[in-house]
Amino acid sequence: MSDTGATCTSDEADLVHKLKEQAVLATAINMKDEAEETNNDNNTEEVEPAAVAVAHPFVNKQPSTFLRVHDLPAVPTHIKISSDDYDSLTSLGLHYLIPTNNKKKSNNKSTDDLKNIVPLDGHTADVVCKSVCENLVQFALNCLFSSEEMWTADRKTAKICKNGAISPELLLNLGHEEVLLWTGKFKNSAYYGSDLPCVKSRGLVSMSPHNLATLLLDSARVPEYNKNSLGRTDACTMQSGLHCESEAFGPGEIKIIKSVNKVPLVNVHLEFASMLHGRKIDDNSYILVGRSIMEASASSHPSNEILLNVHWIQGIPGHPDKCDMVNLNHLKTSMVPMMLAKKIGLSSAVSFMNDIRGVC
């Protein structure tokens, strides 16, 4: 998704210009304040740049970027597009979502999977993004903590957690040597990708919740902790700042990102285009959620998809420079054999946690 081809009226152009000037001024003031700080400790709480609600440059153009919401029933029906609506899919450039026989069959799972997509741009951009982000955060939290029946701990994790819930004290005792691991599958077979394994990991990180959330949200800093990353860029930012909140887009940062990653154990590169949203949950916790997008400019369905990516970051009471991080990763790709998906997922989860710890 890029700005190429986007058109704005003179009033909209003036608004964008004014917002950019405000952003530059706010950033300059913030940089001046930061320069006066004398404490350079890595774990000192960073001052986040002034939150800026960005004028969405695609509000008046035809939708070109879409997101699955099959598992987000609370998203308003009137903004959804069904895969049954062949005329709309064709006019929007999503012809590759239409079954080749142009007819829906009750046993055509590929068609059923593609129901309920929403445009992230166009005249409903603000309404859609606000609703999708709110529902995606709730769904992510439910997957992490309210659906324990979907998760199976590995042998070591099961032994460590045999006495019940994972407490801050347990994490502090485990230190930075352990990564707790679970694998799971969605029980609802109607969910797109429910046949694919997902991986959850959890561990202690010596960084404040705010600093860690800021690190994960910053595309330019991905190479600092992800050795498998070949680059991540922000293609479009709807709203900037973890602490930002606007009437149009709600709380937190919302953007479209493009990334390329190497896959451990197999010699392939995976390209992803996805929406990333980060927000503050309360005074001591943050969440980041991501999901792949579909683009009207594409010639075919994405071969690699982030079905759900979650980072939940919770502070440790009495330890402002430490946090409890829980990650969930659910991918669909035609480039990794199914028999290796679980092994690669677990290996990647451990590597990611240890690489994050290496930045501290």
Image (cartoon, rainbow, N blue to C red):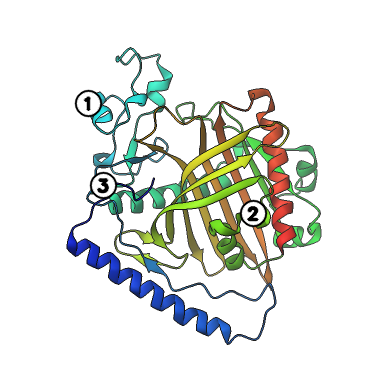
Judge from the rendering whether residue 176 lies leftward or rightward of residue 92; answer left or right. right
Label 2: element kind = helix
Residue 102 image-quadrant placement: top left
Circles 1, 2 touching at the beta carbon (< 8 Å): no
What residue does disc 1 label? 87
Circles 2, 3 touching at the beta carbon (< 8 Å): no
Q: Which of marks 2 and 3 is nearer the N terminus?
A: 3
What residue does disc 3 label? 122
Label 3: element kind = loop
- Residue 204 in percent (x, y) is at 72, 58
Viewer-nearest residue: 130 or 187: 130
Q: Which of marks 3 and 1 is nearer the N terminus?
A: 1
- Residue 44 in percent (x, y) is at 65, 76
- How many numbered marks have been drawn onto this rendered protein structure? 3
Residue visible at 55% across and 81% down in the picture: 34
Q: Residues within 10 Å of mark 3 (few under 14, many from 20)?
A: some
The residues tagged by marks 2 and 3 sit, at their Cα atoms, a distance apart of: 33 Å
Q: What residue type is labelled 2?
A: Pro
Q: Which image quarter holds the C terminus?
A: bottom right
The residues tagged by marks 3 and 1 sit, at their Cα atoms, a distance apart of: 18 Å
What residue does disc 2 label? 223
Viewer-nearest residue: 345 or 227: 227
Mark 2 or mark 3, which is nearer to you?
Answer: 2
Viewer-nearest residue: 102 or 69: 102
Judge whether residue 152 can be spotted in this image. no
